[in-house]
Image (spheres, grey):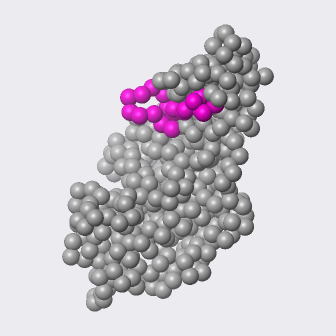
Amino acid sequence: MSHGMDDGPQDGGRRGAPPPVPAPDAGATPRWVDELLRTAAAEVSGVGLDRVPGAQPRRPPAGAPGDFASALPLRLAGAAHTPADRLAADIAAALRAHPQVVDAAVEGRGFVNLTLTPAARVSLVRAVGDGAAYLTGGGPGTAGEPSLGAPDPGAPSAATAAQSAVGRGGAPVWALSALHTATSVEEARILARDDARRRIAHAREAVHAGADDVVRPRGRPPSSGPRQAAPATGAQASGPARIPEVSWRDPYLDERSPRGPVARLLSVTGEASARVAFCRSIPERPRRGEVTGPGLPAVPTAEAPGHWARHTDANPAFRVRYAHAHAVSTLAWSFARGWDVPALPEHAITGRTAAAAGRPLSGHVGPTTTTGLTPAAVAALDEPPAAALIGELFDGPGVLATAARRREPHILVRYLEGLAIAYHEWRESRGAAIGDMIGPETADGACGEGIAARLELCAAAAGVLGTGLSLLGVSAPTRL
């Protein structure tokens, strides 16, 4: 039953057993945290779980307590006939009884800040191995916005998703516009942004409609004419998942006599940097000379490309693509030295089976088992730089859902930049060389479990970075 101003529990909201939320065997994903919060809210408020709105957990601002924050009490207060601050206190008390929760506290006039155990918090890496399914909200235990709490009246049907599979001029949804055929840089910018919007929206719609096979764009399509990226293959029945081989080579950079303003720009920056540049700015029609960062013109030209023509960290496109290449190269390097890894570029897969390698895949058995991460694996993933990277990965599904709903590709671009920065900071905290980053080559026991956990985090970052780049129409190189 529901309780109002005068008939609620007087013991801080605890009513018997803790919320019946399962352990995060598939990882502490946004969906799992959302379910945890909503179940606690339903328990203390008496409102049916199907009527509890989405908790939409977010990481709190720097300096604020907790791992996640939610305004669920503010959204539920009306239906529960209870002031938001009191409802927040009741929810926090119920959450504190959950075995995966260290603390839950009330912030402001109706926010709940939640702190998970380290093992629960870092278990997110289990769910992110399939970057496409995780980022788009189609993997186990993943969700974006709106939350799966109350039914989403705006969720598309299968027919709607099928219709969205056709882009401009009847082109397939994954097809990329031939930017070099645009008559102006401004037109090319519109084409690139439309490509990103269509791919992002369709990835989300396909998940809601159950069409999982169309949410895995990959690679760089041919460089001329109408282009389409074929869906990537998922994990194999056994052994590491295959990551399609993608090179840094850009045919536009090899063009000797480009014709037209767009072709000249692409011959200076390459297509990848141009697409990221076009999608990075917020306004649809930037002012003349507007920049999106130091040395980053919103509308670069061949004569004034800024840092978009550089292969350094000053170029956001290069930074994100290099992070992906480094992560994949780390997996290949580790596999060559005897470690079983979650995913591999095709060039690194040999006849040697995973079982023959003899090293553990990770600190746990698998993403759907009830075996927890070992203490050594948790310690490796809970180091501050690793924890920061896991936090960025947690944000991914919600960010992509927001980008799709608002039709603003810059949201995804900025997210990928932040994820790449977190990845680089994590790897640099381990050492400059790949071997330093992973650990001693002959490690075994607890040390080996920590190394294997870092490899899994490496694969998770590669999966999300590669998927995000592909949704923007940008290739994700697999070699340094």
- In the image, residue 189 sits, relative to residue 138, either above or below, namely below
Whether residue 435 is visible: no
Q: Residue at x 60, y 81 (%)?
A: 170
Residue 377 in picture, x, y percent from top left: 52, 36
Residue 55 in picture, x, y percent from top left: 60, 36
Magenta stretch, residue numbers: 58-76
Q: Residue furthest right?
A: 1
Viewer-proximal residue among 183 and 241 = 183
Residue 221 in picture, x, y percent from top left: 50, 77
Q: Along the horizontal axis of the image, is 38 left or right of 255?
A: right
- In the image, residue 201 sits, relative to residue 147, either above or below, namely below
Residue 352 in picture, x, y percent from top left: 59, 62
Viewer-proximal residue among 3 and 469 = 3
Q: Residue at x 64, y 60 (%)?
A: 205
Quadrant including the C terminus? bottom left
Verify whether residue 143 appears in magenta: no
Q: Residue at x 78, y 22 (%)?
A: 1
To which quarter of the image does residue 294 belong?
bottom left
Viewer-proximal residue among 231 and 347 = 231
- In the image, residue 292 sits, relative to residue 18, either above or below, namely below
Q: Along the horizontal axis of the image, is 455 left or right of 300?
A: right
To which quarter of the image does residue 159 belong?
bottom right
Q: Residue at x 55, y 50 (%)?
A: 397
Whether residue 415 is visible: yes
Q: Along the horizontal axis of the image, is 321 left or right of 455?
A: left
